[in-house]
Amino acid sequence: MPTEGEPLAGAFLAHRRVTEEVVARLPASAADLRPWPGAMSALELVRHMLFAHHRFVELACGRPAPNPDPEAAPTLQEARELLRTTTEYDAQVIRQLSAEQLQTTVRFRERTIPARQLLDLAREHEIHHKGQLFVYARMAGVSELPHWRMLQ
């Protein structure tokens, strides 16, 4: 029997799969690419995206948000693998959420919001940074980029 989390996991994966494809196409030389002084590097952006989403998911489940490991994924290749494993973990956790769990309120940035709203914010955060990642990829010379696909 499908859970209430199934459609949320599907929506997350629809965007994350495109993110994974863009990251897969980044050349290793793009890891330190910064579009402007003070911007995150491509590697830092990828790490930020995966760690932030994972933190949102853990908070939505009522667990403490883990702090990102500053030593994790020091290369784009390692970031690709970490992206893959956190994607699978986060999707599985989201899939299992019940309607009651999604209505549970959680504390986020000095506000109390339903867990479902926090997961919506997580997806919107991913979409925002995915757009930035497309710009980084173009700057790194990537000519073929994937398109977002409708859920099937």
Image (cartoon, rainbow, N blue to C red):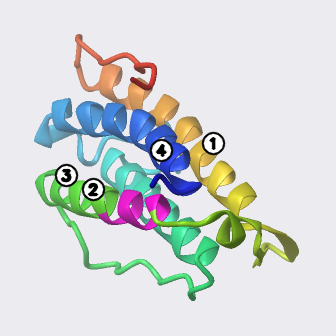
Give neighbour class at mark 4: few <14, some 14-19, many 20+ (Cα, 10 Å). many
Provide the secondary structure element on which disc 1 rests.
helix
Which label belongs to residue 12?
Answer: 4
How far apart in space, not on screen, are marks 2 and 4 (Cα)?
13 Å
| Region rendered in magenta | 89-95
- Asked if the stretch drawn in magenta spans residue 5, the answer is no
Give the residue type at disc 4: Phe
Determine contact: label 3, label 2, CB under 8 Å.
yes
Query: First in sequence: mark 1 or mark 2?
Result: 2
How far apart in space, not on screen, are marks 1 and 2 (Cα)?
17 Å
| Magenta stretch secondary structure, dominant | helix
Which of 53/13 is in front?
A: 13
**What residue appears at the point 19 percent right and 51 percent down from the top-left corner?**
80
The residue carrying mark 2 is: 83
The residue carrying mark 3 is: 80
Provide the secondary structure element on which disc 4 rests.
helix
How far apart in space, not on screen, are marks 3 and 2 (Cα)?
5 Å
Which label belongs to residue 124?
Answer: 1
